[in-house]
Image (spheres, grey):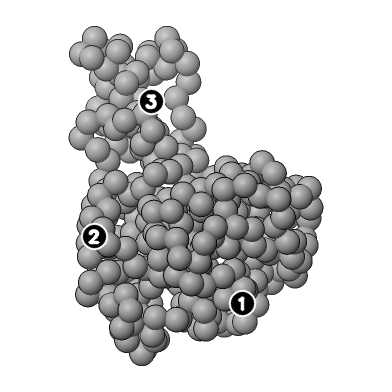
Amino acid sequence: MKRRSITASIRGGVLVGALALSSMAIGSGPAQAQTSYQRGPNPTTASLNASAGPFAVSTSSITGASGFGGGTVYYPTDTSQGTFGGVVITPGFTATSGTYAGLARRVASHGFVVAAINTNSTLDQPDSRGAQMLRALDWLAGSSPTAVRSRLDSSRMAAAGHSMGGGGTLRAANDRPSLQAAVALQPWHSSKSWTGVRVPTMIIGAENDSIASVSSHSEPFYNSMSNAPEKAYVELNGESHMAAATNPADQARAMVAWLKRYVDDDTRYDAFTCPPPSSSDYSEWRNTCPNSGGGGGTPPTTTPPVEECEWWEWWCTDSNALRGFLGIG
């Protein structure tokens, strides 16, 4: 999906004319209109705080999958509103998919196909969990049962996880910039630098987390993500490390709003993330507003590597076309 307009970034009649001519020579550039995949009624604080969203949910067990440990898919039964974005939720150290059944069902009920997965071993480290998460996303897109796959838009995928699964989420976002969003819940990882993340990423920490303390994990992760096109750090007031498992409304409200905004491009959810909500549920909330006012993040000053062109696709495509046309390489 295209989230930036080249005409908003390169000004001046000469350059615009050059771009037009270069497009005629090498083909059309990316679409400039933002596409929205709105699903469900207009959101309210009450609807996001509710234990379930507007969609009824069915489940399907994951069997015979390769590269991760199975799990359960939660998906909307509705077929009248088109397909839905996909989310993989990865567990923390020693945990299993069942630990997050409430969270997975809750997210699915807002219009997502959600795979809560098991890892190959409950002792797997974050980077392994991230790799398994990517395999699960690929399974969801290519090998899941027809009832699941027919409801999935595989071009709109997101990663989420808790604790070491949250650390795995950062690794998955780092390694696959085509993801539409990532949400790391009380994340733990030994690496504190995530400058390679080019995916809109929300980190949800817990104020009283004694396992992955926000000062040692969530906050350094957030501060390091200098190349994320959008990012947010949310701190749950009074919550502990197991907030992802207990599934409190304040966490779900932030997570669902982020996924709806970036997986669905649904600007109705801007009001719940930008500016940050004023609520005693959150001891802290930082982000890179604005979300829909042209988007956040800073375009690179040089053309990114090909594998990182998903988010800055207009730059990679149009910048290269312009340079070729002008013969400046």
Question: Label 3 crowding class (10 Å Cα cut-off): few <14, some 14-19, many 20+?
Answer: some
Q: Whole-Å distance between the Cαs marked 3 and 2? A: 32 Å
Q: In this image, 244 relative to 195: left or right?
A: right
Give the residue at x 45% y 81%: 243
Contact, mark 3 vs mark 2 (Cβ under 8 Å): no
Q: Whole-Å distance between the Cαs marked 1 and 3? A: 42 Å
Which sits in the foreground, 45 or 220?
A: 220
Give the residue at x 60% y 53%: 85
Q: In this image, 111 relative to 236: left or right?
A: right
The first of marks 1 and 3 along the sequence is: 1
Q: Whole-Å distance between the Cαs marked 1 and 2? A: 29 Å
Q: Secondary structure at mark 1?
A: helix
The first of marks 3 and 2 along the sequence is: 2
Question: Label 2 crowding class (10 Å Cα cut-off): few <14, some 14-19, many 20+?
Answer: some
**Which quadrant of the view contains residue 208?**
bottom left
Image coords of residue 108 (percent x, y): 64, 66
In the rendered structure, which amino acid carries the disc numbered 3?
Thr
> What residue is shown with label 2?
192
Q: Quadrant of the C terminus?
A: top left
| Marker disc for residue 287 | none
Q: How many marks?
A: 3
> What residue is shown with label 3?
317
Image coords of residue 267 (percent x, y): 49, 59
In the rendered structure, which amino acid carries the disc numbered 1?
Gly
In the rendered structure, which amino acid carries the disc numbered 2?
Lys
The first of marks 1 and 2 along the sequence is: 1
State which mark lies toward you, 1 or 3. 1
> What residue is shown with label 1?
102
Give the residue at x 65% y 71%: 105
Give the residue at x 44% y 70%: 93
Image coords of residue 41 (percent x, y): 65, 67
Q: Relative to residue 62, is residue 27 depicted above or below?
A: above
